[in-house]
Amino acid sequence: MNPLAQQLNETLQQESPAVYDMLSNLGKAIYFPKEGILSQSAEAKAKAKKYNATIGIATENGVPMHLKVIQDTLSAYNPKDIYEYAPPAGKPELRSAWRDKMLKDNPSLESISAEISTPIVTNALTHGLSIVADLFAEAGDPVIIPDKNWENYELTFGIRRNAQIVEYPLYNEQMRFNSEGLKQALLAQKSKGKAIVILNFPNNPTGYTPDVQDGAAIVAAIKEAAEQGIKIVAVTDDAYFGLFFEDSMQESLFSKLADTHSNVLAVKVDGATKEEYVWGFRVGFITYASSSKAALAALEQKTLGIIRATISSGPHPSQTFVLHALQSPQFEAQKAEKFNIMKQRANIVKDLLDSGRYGDTLQYYPFNSGYFMCLRLSDVSAEAVRQHLLEHYGIGTIALGQTDLRVAFSCIEAEQLEELFDCIYQSVQAVSQQ
């Protein structure tokens, strides 16, 4: 094993032995090189005042070389902020700005005893989850998710890392979050002694976020499993964070999980992708919590090792664009404007479905946040309805399993929602008569 990896492992064994035990074999072997091209280039950048012949970019007249046809569309930005490589951890100013935003959005973080790492930039949220999988998921390790989930979890953890996907029902009989189901799924892993839990709120595909009471029950379930010796990587997938339209948690569970138990490693995966409506920019973040600064530093080095070994570093232009937005005095007002549009659409959908105009044909799962909602079709195939909508109305939806039809109100104008759900209703009626 490389001495740098061994040194990081020894730090974790001393500072946070439970976290060391959570690491996969890859997680134990990975490290960020302190010698080589990157370190020598960094040293040259600081000291080579005459000529710097280390960096793998081209320069001209003292700035990064670029094409005018590209720079003309980006003239508001300095070439050094878009053409050079970003550091593997991301643009430092952006990392600090996102940390400040995270603390503002999650005021509970100010009162916890654990330390919070400075967010590391990822190539959006899928990349952040992939880093978690590489660092912590070994073949056969249980990854616990609700039965209504984003299909990429299966690819990222199940297919790529050969982990075991363990599902529990998202809702209980009262149609609230099934914290008891989560707890039982966790306790069932006692013989393995380890589990990865992914908490995605607002949930994709249902658009559901638990309330404060249920959030406390989630934390209690994880704590109980940790007290029984199960080492838990608790991952909050906060892709749609902030889009809370009704009575629900207003903070990430990361705040509550950060210092729950020494057997719990809280990991926050989030990003500008959905929050700031910049899906194609591919700017996400990964943040850790620990009682030990040394342990956080070791986890950061291992994370950078994964980044270096896969994408090397994230795109610089989009990081600059997001940083510019976060620093703008118009940022908060413009976000509030978009939030109100999204909330209006969600309310219209709920009013339509609760109006009685569709009888009991269009039942739906509770939703209060995010981009989506899910219909529960009892007498027809969701796939058959999806096909009928495409063929007869030119309308696209997502069929999930036998009964569930996901509708993204995020991409439908408010005045179009009534027609959309009328067409869905008509398709269900037509399919049921076939």
Image (tube, grey):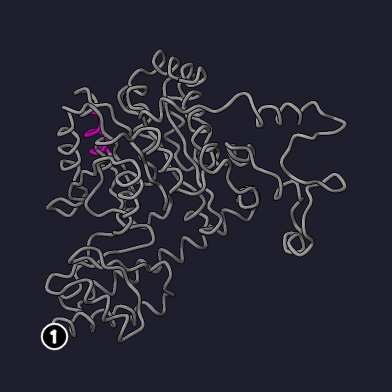
- Direction top: furthest residue: 14
Q: Is residue 353 above or below residue 141?
A: below
Which residue is depicted at the point 31% across and 55% down? 151
Most common SS among magenta residues: helix
Which x, y percent locates residue 79? Answer: 76, 50
Q: Is residue 153 above or below residue 140?
A: below
Which residue is depicted at the point 21% across and 76% down? 384
In the image, the segment drawn in magenta is 216-223
Residue 345 falls in image quadrant? bottom left
Number of labels in the image equals 1
Residue 218 falls in image quadrant? top left
Relative to residue 393, is residue 111 drawn left or right? right
Q: Is residue 161 above or below residue 414?
A: above
Relative to residue 347, is residue 180 drawn left or right? left
Q: Is residue 121 magenta?
A: no
Residue 132 falls in image quadrant? top left
The residue nearer to you, when weighing 291 against 308, is: 308
Which x, y percent locates residue 361? Answer: 16, 76
Which x, y percent locates residue 237? Answer: 38, 45
Which residue is depicted at the point 35% across and 57% down? 369
Q: Is residue 42 above or below residue 67?
A: above
Helix or strand or loop: what does disc 1 sit on? loop
What residue sits right under mark 1 in the picture? 434
| Pointer 1 local density, CA inside 10 Å: few below 14, some 14–19, many at least 20 | few
Which x, y percent locates residue 371? Answer: 38, 61
Relative to residue 168, is residue 45 drawn left or right? right
Dot 1 amino acid type = Gln
